[in-house]
Image (cartoon, rainbow, N blue to C red):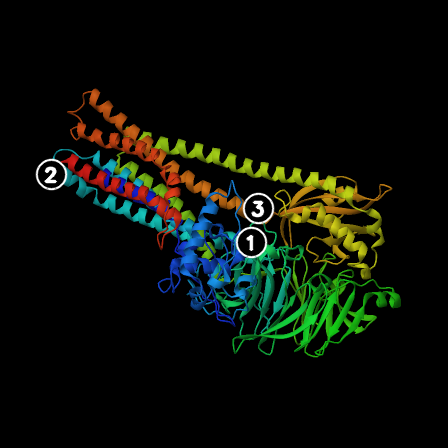
Amino acid sequence: MREISKFWVTIGFILLVNTGYTQPSANHDHSLESVTVYGPVKPGEMLWTIAARLPFDKLVNRHQVVLALLQANPQAFKNSCNLNSLKVGSILKIPSLSTVSEIDRAYAIEEIAKQAAQWQNRKTQPVNCSTLDTSRGALLQQAVTENVSPVLLVQTDPVIPKAVGDNLPEALGSNIHTILDSTYFMSFIALLIVGITIWAVIIWKLLITQLSTDKKANFNWVYSMKKILNNIVFVSITTVCGVLYIYLNSHLFFEFEDAFAQKLTLNYPIYAVQDSKGNRYVIDNSLRRISKVNTKDEVVYYISGGNREEKHFFYANEIEVDDDGYLYVLNYVADDKGFYLNREEILRFSPNGNYDGLVYRKTFSESDKKAQLIQRGEIFSLEIRHNVLSWFNLTSEGITQYNYHIQYNEIKKVSYYPLAEANIVVGDITQLSAGNFVYSSKDGLITQVQLDGSSRVLFSAEKAKAKSGDFIVPWEIGTDASGQIYFIDLEGKNVRTIVSPAETKILLDQSIIESQQEIQIKAFNYYRLSVNLDGTLITCNDEAVVTQMSTGTISYLTSANLPLTWQLEIFIFGGIGLILIFLIIWEIRLIYTDVLKRNVPNILKLSIGIVIIVTLVTFLSSYYFITNFSGRYQQVVFEKISQVIQLVPKVLDGNRIERIKEQSDFNNQDYKYVYGTLYNALNKNQDYWNEGYYFALYRVINDRLYGFMYTDGRINMYYPFDWLGDGGVYDQALAGKIATEAATDITGDWIYGVGPVTNKEGKVIALLEIGTDLYYLRMENERLIKELVLNLAIVLIILILLLVEISYISELHKQKYQKILDECQYFSEVMLIRPLSFLYFTAVSVSVTFIPLLMKKFYEPIPGFSQEMVLAMPLSLEMFFFGIGTTIAGIISSR
């Protein structure tokens, strides 16, 4: 029986080794040009194996398919001319069969062989890029050079059934397929199998020690133990089910800070919209969560972000909702450093919060990397009017408007307006009607563009200042059905409407909110604004979503109540946790009192002691290593940032900074010179030491901190922050010191440092901030830690089994040499074979674990299997047959 249990332990190990493999699938996204795409590329995938999965692989030679994929997707390779440099996470555009057929077969075979040789010798000789000979049938030039994927129409996917109720989204457990596809879930199941097996071994050992050679006595004893065994089995099965339930629903308990207070507290809400039924949709948690709240201030669903996978969002920059309750999300996905944008896309979610399709996607290649794509994209202003979703693409050449007709499922280009550096000078943009739009610029103007291309200024901050003395900084804008224009005034911390080019009217500010709500609030900054057709205004501050109805009524939402079903699940979760603790204690008591008769065998004492000591030592050492590693890494980043901040201000021209005063000075020669100096000081983020680092320049005017200049150009010169007066890093920098910290705000998690910028007289005239995205750093750390924990768990199990076997053989020798065979008649020397065999095969297995590293040189792709799967297959088979052999040998030796 012990041999059988060991076989299942071996199967558990095989599951652990191979849980990282998932079968890739091609996603067919239908575009205006019917282009098919594959992706994203997963770790271990090669172009050769991807080509084997495509439908026309049998119609043409695979070498032709591989070369066609390479030529059609230069942005997907680190070296655009070598198929061996495929990047993980890339989306591959698949050329048509006719295009693939144009490539000469003999040439394709020759070219791929040449690239393989170049790749093998790349360390001594750089890869030499060559292009296809057009006489041999080159691919279409458009497919070769196009780096941006075409417009994609909505791809409808089957709605995933929800686990509990109609209002529970996939984030609350309805997407069971996502959970089952998780590597960590499969690892958990494998570990659970191993744990159950070890527990079964212990139970069997306890039972076998109670048996004697008298079969009748054994029968009577087993019969008397029936009730006890039934209780133990029942408790064990219940415990396993409880552990599985807690694992699958742990996110529900830990998602809400106020779970037992029955509410969801908004965490840095940054943008919100409201549908025709009064439901509000809020982006918070540093752009990584979207919540739907009904008119009763109850959560209908929430969708968690921070996920790079398809059918999920990472950073939700904007949202919009149609009359049927479908939610449209502008999703930003950056590179591994959290710096340059890899893709931006518009995703659609159903009224229940489930993924419903991809509306539009734009991908960016290595050659597209520029400052304006640092954590921001080119898509702006999602708006729905008359069942049509519209948005604008802002580039360095101009503004393009697109319409997506929801009913007809098609996208059309509406208009194009040439505007130099539109992606830099435009603050926000909104449509008035088809082809007519209004945009705010960072020089303090609000401009209307007509369908014929003519434009006129609707508001000028300079004229308003000259007329009334008011210093107004227009930012995000919106319009209602009548064409009335509303905008955020960054300086005044309010929402205004335009009366004339030099006059505005305040509609919403702190005093209006306090008088209506009868509350006291801080003087928050307001950055984002959405406007409904009926004139309803929705904006956010650091703690709440502020909604002003067209009637003037104001709501101030800081938290939302959880539905009763969610509250019930949370309490069930906590209750099951307590019950599990009780069941485990009860099971231990049953075994100790009824099975062992309060007499614990030596082998069990040794085994329990080994498990406790090894687990405790492993946990403490791992915890120390992980925390020490994270702390040391963060300290290295702080030191690096401090050194850069100490050097960069020395090359800045303080006089030029002081000459930039008015909003109209934005992007003038002095502004561009200062920006260019900072950008070049970081060598345009082209090196390893500066990759992923941004800069920000601030000024302090009248004791108020203003963002002055960002690497990505997203802000104007008077972008206010309330970060002074608390003795923090900005106060320290203002005092002439360099200070560093890690912090979270409405836009994300950051690790950064701030230092002073002085003029010739030594006066601090600006503050320089340099930092990087901390969330991506934490994600990478979490990934490494999960892999470390998984590997440690495997090593820990093997070590425990090894020590138990050593203890077992020691106990057998003790029984043998103490000459107690008469008292222990079930003992046989043949039993020594098992632990000795285990030690022998363990030594053999450990010695051959490095074989896959050497096998990489001989690796040949096998369709349907990843490289890791193929390399691990010999060892997996060896362990599998070792388990079978051990089982058979155990049965034979027992007889």
Q: Which label belongs to residue 777?
A: 3
Of mark 1 and mark 2, the one earlier in the sequence is 2
Find the distance from the CA under tag 1 to the CA under tag 3. 27 Å
Q: In the image, is residue 123 above or below residue 265?
A: above
Whether tag 1 and tag 3 are in contact, CB under 8 A, the answer is: no
Find the distance from the CA under tag 1 to the CA under tag 2. 61 Å
Q: Residues within 10 Å of mark 3 (few under 14, many from 20)?
A: many
The kind of residue tagged 1 is: Asp
Q: Residue 758: image x %, image y %?
A: 81, 43
Instruction: Residue under label 2, please give it.
Output: 216
Q: Is residue 282 left or right of residue 701?
A: left
Mark 1, secondary structure of its residue? loop
Q: Which label belongs to residue 258?
A: 1
Q: Residues within 10 Å of mark 2 (few under 14, many from 20)?
A: few
The kind of residue tagged 3 is: Leu
Q: Residue at x 55, y 50 (%)?
A: 336
Mark 2, secondary structure of its residue? helix
Quadrant hosting residue 641: top right
Residue placed most toward the observer, 382 or 52: 52
Of mark 1 and mark 3, the one earlier in the sequence is 1
Residue placed most toward the observer, 696 or 49: 49
Residue projecting furthest to the front: 135
Q: Residues within 10 Å of mark 1 (few under 14, many from 20)?
A: some
Residue placed most toward the observer, 551 or 197: 197
Image depth: mark 1 or mark 3 in front: 3
Image depth: mark 2 or mark 3 in front: 3
Find the distance from the CA under tag 2 to the CA under tag 3. 66 Å
Residue projecting furthest to the top: 818
Quadrant hosting residue 291: bottom right
Q: Is residue 204 left or right of residue 734?
A: left
